[in-house]
Image (cartoon, helix red, strand yellow):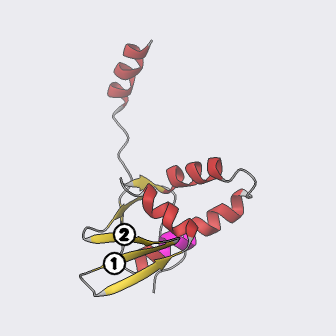
Amino acid sequence: MTRPESVTQSRVVARTAGISLRQVGAHVFLVDGRRDAIHSLDPISGGIWRLLAKPREREEIAAVLADAFPDVPKPRLDRDIARVLNALEAAGLVQVQAPRAAPPAAQKRKRLTRLT
């Protein structure tokens, strides 16, 4: 069983290959042909799935949802994000990858120099 803290802030979350999205009216489903499974998504889960069109760190997902739902307290958003990501991971629909490597300090300086 996946522990709630398995998708930590610094991890990158990516969709598992071969999962397709189907929308029927307001209902969103993920079809996993590998396991002959269909998963129904609630609106928040569907939004997070769409954000994962490219691999993202959990902080990126939280920032987008915080902008989209400014009246929702941050602790609640964090719990919802953890719930969704851990459920998607437990179902094999996403993969959690190592954090993105920060560029070496020399490359950072060069980039900053070019921007100024």
Residue 11 placement: quadrant: bottom left
- Residue 61's tag is none
Residue 5 visible in the shown view:
no
> Badge 2 is on which residue?
21
Magenta stretch: give its range: 82-86
**Answer yes or no: do the residues labelled 2 and 1 have beta carbons within 8 Å?**
yes
Q: Amino acid at mark 1?
A: Val
- Residue 31's tag is 1
At 37% across and 83% down in the image, what residue appears?
38
In which quadrant will I find the N terminus? bottom left
Q: Dot 1, how many residues are within 10 Å of its Cα: few (below 14), some (14-19), or many (20+)?
A: some
Question: Seen from this angle, which residue lies furthest top?
Answer: 116
Q: CA distance from mark 2 to mark 1?
A: 6 Å
Q: Is residue 8 magenta?
A: no
Residue 46 visible in the shown view:
yes
Q: Is residue 83 magenta?
A: yes
Above or below for 69 versus 76: above
* Closest to the observer, 9 or 47: 47
